Image (cartoon, rainbow, N blue to C red):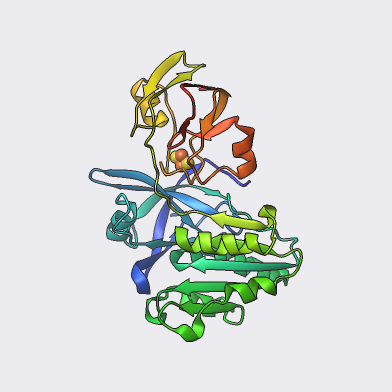
């Protein structure tokens, strides 16, 4: 897993307003210095600040992993979000700077796979574009299925063309039955050691993943990336002990461990607060976890010795954390 916590101030070198409420931002070092390297599937943590808004948001890199001159991200304006994307759309102007951390990669490409099938729904195509660029360089067999509502609302078309990916990207539009994605046929045609990658809205991801599982594709060959998720923090009250800090708090229904501990003076770093980025993962010393995140793998959840404290809860009355 590729991770760097170094914070950087980057210049917005180019803003491109794409169809479908998506803006593409090209970011460079103000002095033109080379940027830290990244691998396909990586994202940036972007600090979005304006007035009362002070959030960190995760945006996948769609630029070429071989290029260290600039990063490029795509941001969908989402009126249902907590304000990060709308704010970024409003404040991101060429010549302004943005604070970023990363790149980090929780969605790495398995470059050794003989065949890869990439499924991007809407803005979920961004990491897939970086993956497609890399797979093309490696000369691997792959197809990128890009699903959107309609042709006129499809972003990144010029980028796909400019990157020479037109032959390996298949567009599927909701309003054009002639382009419907035949997932059954695609998966039936997948080779034995194929790897599947999916990113997009929850329903789209569930659809692809459940079909892949039904075709007997093992979980270690199905890779998913969540941009955001709804968080259910309902449940009974429980106690959390932050052992190293010598602090104990009660977490009520509707509250989170991270917020409860922060109020008691225990510093817990959070970013997405939706269980998707992994920033808040803490080691669990005692107690049974009610995992509600989308970050830990099923195996990690089964092991029961770590949890995302921004959203997950206790199954019992008490948890002891190594904080
Ligand atoms: S803050 Fe992102 S997973 Fe908890």
In the orientation shown, which residue stands out farthest toward the top? Answer: 246
In the rendered image, the vertical position of residue 309 relative to residue 48, given as above or below: above
Left or right position of 66 against 114:
left
Q: Residue at x 50, y 79 (%)?
A: 180
Q: Is residue 69 visible?
A: no
Left or right position of 232 against 215:
left
Residue 272: x %, y % from top left: 42, 44
Q: Quadrant of residue 149?
A: bottom left
Q: How many discs mark residues in the rendered view? A: 0
Camera-nearest residue between 253 and 2: 253
Q: Residue at x 53, y 34 (%)?
A: 307
Q: Is residue 97 visible?
A: yes
Residue 260: x %, y % from top left: 36, 26
Residue 221: x %, y % from top left: 68, 57
Camera-nearest residue between 294 and 238: 238
Residue 278: x %, y % from top left: 51, 41
């Amino acid at each position: 897993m590729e991770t760097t916590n170094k914070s950087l101030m980057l210049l917005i070198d180019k803003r491109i307003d794409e169809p479908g409420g998506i803006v593409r931002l090209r970011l460079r070092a103000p002095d033109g210095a080379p940027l830290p390297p990244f691998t396909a599937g990586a994202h940036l943590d972007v600090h979005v600040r304006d007035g009362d808004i002070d959030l960190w948001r995760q945006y996948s890199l769609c630029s070429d992993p071989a290029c260290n001159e600039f990063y490029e991200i795509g941001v969908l304006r989402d009126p249902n979000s907590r304000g990060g994307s709308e704010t970024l759309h409003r404040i991101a102007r060429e010549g302004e700077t943005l604070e970023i951390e990363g790149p980090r990669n929780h969605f790495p490409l398995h470059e050794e796979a003989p065949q890869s099938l990439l499924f991007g729904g809407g803005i979920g195509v961004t990491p897939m574009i970086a993956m497609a660029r890399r797979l093309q360089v490696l000369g691997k067999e792959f197809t990128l299925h890009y699903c959107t509502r309609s042709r006129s609302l499809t972003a990144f078309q010029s980028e796909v063309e400019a990157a020479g990916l037109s032959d390996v990207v298949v567009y599927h539009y909701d309003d054009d039955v002639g382009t419907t994605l035949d997932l059954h046929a695609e998966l039936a045609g997948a080779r034995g050691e194929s790897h599947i990658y999916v990113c997009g809205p929850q329903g789209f991801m569930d659809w692809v993943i459940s079909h892949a599982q039904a075709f007997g594709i093992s979980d270690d060959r199905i890779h998913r990336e969540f941009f955001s998720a709804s968080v259910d923090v309902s449940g009974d009250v429980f106690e959390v002990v932050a052992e190293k800090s010598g602090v104990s708090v009660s977490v009520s229904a509707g509250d989170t461990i991270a917020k409860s501990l922060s109020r008691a003076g225990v510093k817990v770093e959070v970013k997405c607060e939706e269980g998707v980025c992994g920033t808040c993962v803490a080691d669990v010393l005692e107690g049974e976890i009610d995992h509600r995140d989308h970050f830990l793998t099923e195996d990690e959840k089964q092991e029961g010795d770590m949890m995302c404290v921004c959203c997950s809860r206790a199954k019992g009355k008490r948890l002891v954390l190594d904080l």
